[in-house]
Amino acid sequence: MKVFEKIKNDIAEINNSFDMMEYLEKIKPSAILYCKEKYKDGIVEIDSEVKLLESGMINYLNSEIDN
């Protein structure tokens, strides 16, 4: 299963805005961690802050979930 498929399934199960907000806030940090390990071209470091590029997010969303 791809990450984006899992996200779609998880979001369908969310029943309130607070839980949705919490879930959505976790996606970007997860994508950054993925890129640091598997797709270094998907992030850049500017003034010691890591920025996620669109290509990094797309690569993360299209990646297969490790079981």
Image (spheres, rainbow, N blue to C red):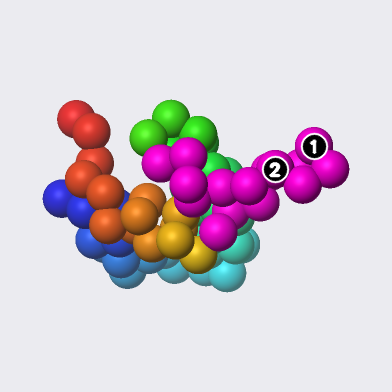
Question: Is the residue under label 1 in contact with that under label 2 (CB below 8 Å)?
Answer: yes
Relative depth, front residue between 11 and 32: 32
Is 22 on the left or on the right of 1, as rendered? Answer: right
Q: Residues within 10 Å of mark 2 (few under 14, many from 20)?
A: few
Residue at figure coordinates x 27%, y 57% from the top left? 62
Label 2 sits on a secondary structure element that is strand
Residue at figure coordinates x 23%, y 33% from the top left? 66
Q: Residues within 10 Å of mark 1 (few under 14, many from 20)?
A: few
Is residue 45 visible in this depiction of the protein?
A: yes
Is residue 11 placed above or below 59 in the rendered structure? below
Residue 40 is inside the magenta segment? yes
From the image, tell me which residue sits under label 1: 48
Is residue 32 placed above or below 11 in the rendered structure? above
Residue at figure coordinates x 58%, y 53% from the top left? 52
Is 11 on the left or on the right of 47, as rendered? Answer: left
Q: Report x, y in % for residue 21.
A: 60, 62
Image quarter of the C terminus: top left
Label 1 sits on a secondary structure element that is loop
Q: Report x, y in % for residue 26.
A: 55, 49
Magenta-colored span: 39-53
Residue 2 is inside the magenta segment? no
Is 46 on the left or on the right of 53, as rendered? Answer: right
Q: Total number of numbered labels?
A: 2
The amino acid pointed to by label 1 is Ser
The amino acid pointed to by label 2 is Glu
From the image, tell me which residue sits under label 2: 45
Q: Report x, y in % for residue 24.
A: 53, 60
Is 65 on the left or on the right of 39, as rendered? Answer: left
Relative depth, front residue between 34 and 66: 34
Q: Residue furthest left?
A: 1
Residue at figure coordinates x 55%, y 59% from the top left? 53
Relative depth, front residue between 19 and 4: 4
